Image (spheres, grey):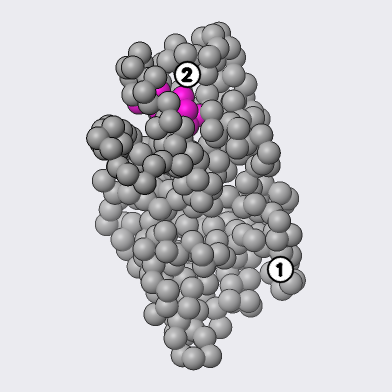
Amino acid sequence: MRPAAVTSADEDFDHLTAPFRAELLAYCYRMLGSLHDAEDQLQETLLRAWRSYDGFQGRASLRTWLYRIATNTCLRALETRGRRPLPSGLGGPSADSEAALITASPQTAWLQPYPDDPAAVHTARAGMRLALIAALQHLTPRQRAVLILRDVLGWRAAEVAELLGTSTAAVASALQRARAQLRRAALIEEDVSEPSDQQLRVLLTRYASAFENADMTALMDVLTEEAALEMPPHLTWFTGRELVVRFLAAKALHTRGAVRMVPTSANGQPAFGTYRRGPDGGHHPQSLQVLTVTATGVTHVVAFHDPSLFPAFGLPASL
């Protein structure tokens, strides 16, 4: 632990590392698929860096040195942890909108969404989309690191080799295998046809209004034909607009005003905090919905039924 008394060396360390903390947190999240785990590993990275700072001596760039420590801490963390899936990574979709939902074991560690920082370049949408983070979970830890550093962050092969203590040939081989694995399993969503800002605002307004008014016709209009709905920790998920709407009509959206939607964003994608009316008349956190939206409508919704996520997204405890 750091000493209670703050020295000039401590202040110097804090000042020099502060510009890199947000991007290191995003990197740890990409590696681990969990905001909570990423925060823990960022703290571990900074602690290890502080302990060895006297021996750093500027032999490499500070950014590269911090990334090396962060990579090693994440690789160690992944040695004892399984991948964090979404329901679609564990089985096929359900064809029965009336059946009871199947809930996973409480021990299942799910993929988590990541709150956006509008001022941060490192959280550019292409490198943080939920589909990419889910796909990375299917790679080995070292393949994951190589693909993130090369394809997402744009590092040169020689830089990645130096960071990982290996050869450029080994980096190229790991990157080739990682890309092939993702292509083979079709784990990356097709290029998303981004709507214009005006189209996006209209689509999101219509989507939120459909939920708040329990308007199934309006919801049909805003979803694309192939739309999918996932709801961790439930293993049950659906694909196809009609099946999704039938499920919501049967299980979730019965009464106008029972649900309220508060906009936010996650993983460079539009999102909503969903609040359901309780016996006290107030609306309380139910799920955090992360949407994939194209010019033709909403194509994918992942509704994380985990109210503990709400504070990280600046969402209120109740309405």
View extreme (bottom): residue: 280
Q: In this view, does 220 lie to the left or right of 195?
A: right
How far apart in space, not on screen, are marks 2 and 1 (Cα)? 45 Å
Q: Where is residue 206 drawn, in percent x and y?
A: 38, 69
Q: Where is residue 211 in the image (x, y as percent from the top left)?
A: 46, 74
Which residue is located at x 68 percent, y 42 percent?
82
Q: Name the residue under label 2.
A: 163
Decide: few, some or many residues near mark 1? Use Cα within 10 Å; few <14, some 14-19, many ≥20: some
Picture layout, residue 205 above or below residue 265: below
- The tag on residue 226 is none
In terms of secondary structure, where does tag 1 sit?
loop
Q: Does the magenta stretch include residue 64?
A: yes
For marks 2 and 1 on the same chain, the one whose residue lies earlier in the sequence: 1
Nearer the observer: mark 2 or 1; the answer is 2
Residue 80: give x, y in percent of width and height. Answer: 68, 38
Residue 259 vertical position relative to residue 144 in the rendered view, above or below: below
| Residue 127 appearing in the image | no
Camera-side residue of 203 and 60: 60
Range of residues picked out in magenta: 63-71
Compared with residue 15, is residue 314 higher up or lower down, i.e. above or below? below
| Residue 31 placement, left or right of 97 | left
Instruction: Specify the quadrant of the image occupied by residue 54.
Output: top left
Q: Which amino acid does label 1 sit on?
A: Leu
Q: Residue at x 39, y 67 (%)?
A: 315
Mark 2 Cα within 10 Å, few/some/many (few <14, many 20+)?
Answer: some
Tag 2: amino acid: Leu
Question: What number is the disc on residue 101?
Answer: 1
Residues at marks 2 and 1 touching, judged by CB atoms closer than 8 Å: no
Q: In this view, does 10 lie to the left or right of 77?
A: left
Q: How many labels does the image show?
A: 2
Mark 2: secondary structure: helix
